[in-house]
Image (tube, grey):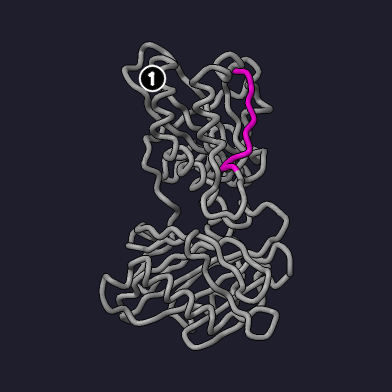
Amino acid sequence: MKKQIVLIILCSIVMLVVGCDNGNKRVKNSWMRPKSSGTPYEMMVVMDEQQWERPVGRALFGVLDTDVPGLPQSERSFRISRIQPDSFGRMFKIFRNIIVLDIQNIYTQPKLKFSRDVYASPQMIMTIQAPDEASLANYLNENGQVIIDFFTRAEMNREIDNLREVHNPEVSEKAKAMFETDIWVPLEIDKFKTGKDFFWASTNRGEKDMNLVMYSFPYTDTKTFTREYYLNKRDSVMKANIPGGPEGSYMATQRDFVTVKDGTVQGQYAQIARGLWYVKGDQMGGPFVAHSRVDEKNGRVIVAEAFIYAPETLKRNLMRRMEAALYTMRLPEDKPINNIVYGLEEIVIEPDFSK
């Protein structure tokens, strides 16, 4: 009897190890990988020093060093480290974000491929293939935004996974009660204010303050999604609901610094705005990003906005952490929350841990 029990346990372990491909084309048994190293928005580039100093290396550096949009000061998209290919051993292979150049004349044109959780988890490795350095440099100059968006989304997906496991349930409950929506925000956002069709959640910590605002209004037609309509609506809602410290002060929008674009969230249309806010009558301000979406079931527009107040400190990671939370907003007719889909070819690599 004991032998049978041991055999069943062994068979179960084998099934778990062999059958761990979850349909997302991740490397098999990625749950067995060590935890990846590095902090959010850190990048490891595998490239020799001579290439790094030539046009191809300068082109890649220029892509990764691009400023993050919508922030009040210059902050680059990624913190960059570089390592020689012959030094790219096991210790460095567990880095969270890695770019590897594969330049060989067997290729006919430049191409991007990626693989997930190869040596560690979570991990994203992008391989850039090209027949020569000149074509690769041109490709990077023309397609740099693809690389920026790819790794930014990878980091946001990691934050979404974290929020899936740990988020403030009280915010989710209030969003459901007021707007029939669900949204996940960091646990430390635990101060609340409500108004007419308006909800504000905040850490209320003075410095490095994270905020979520949600509000709704009737949907009439597509003219609702013009830049001017959005700016007027935002200013009117914030003036009525977010006062400043001095009497008569209130939140407003720095209109010249706002971009408004069409996008997709949860597979549905969304208007995505980002820019700067300030308090009229006071000396406060910071960045914000907002998603405006149509709730077809209830004939209204629901806006979810993240803004931060973090004077005299870097804001990229705080802002992107909150932006990831916006992607978790689920309207009544949305399907269960999924991570952002990548538009690149994925390759699955079984790692060699002997090196």
Counting every numbered tag in the picture gives: 1
Mark 1 neighbour density, 10 Å: few (under 14) some (14–19) many (20 or more): some
Q: Position of residue 25 (x, y in %)?
A: 42, 40
Q: Residue at x 41, y 17 (%)?
A: 134
Q: From the viewer's perspective, tell me whether residue 225 is left or right of residue 339.
A: left
Find numbered disc 1 in the image and state the secondary structure of the residue it sits on.
Answer: helix
Q: Quadrant of residue 133?
A: top left
Q: Which of the pair 195/279 is nearer the observer?
A: 279
Which residue, as the protein is rendered here, is positioned at the far left? Answer: 221
Q: Quadrant of residue 230?
A: bottom left
Q: What residue is shown at x 43% (from left), y 68% (from top)?
A: 330
Q: Amino acid at mark 1?
A: Ser
Q: Is residue 259 above or below residue 100?
A: below
The quadrant the C terminus occupies is top right
Dot 1 corresponds to which residue?
135
Examine the structure image and report whether residue 82 is included in the region drawn in magenta: yes
Q: Which residues are magenta?
A: 76-85
Any magenta on residue 251? no
Q: Is residue 65 left or right of residue 215?
A: right
Taking 251 as reference, is 114 left or right?
A: left
Say if residue 7 shows up in the picture.
no
Find residue 300 and report its horizontal and vertical position in percent: 34, 79
Q: Position of residue 292 (x, y in %)?
A: 40, 68
Q: Which sits in the foreground, 168 or 50?
A: 50
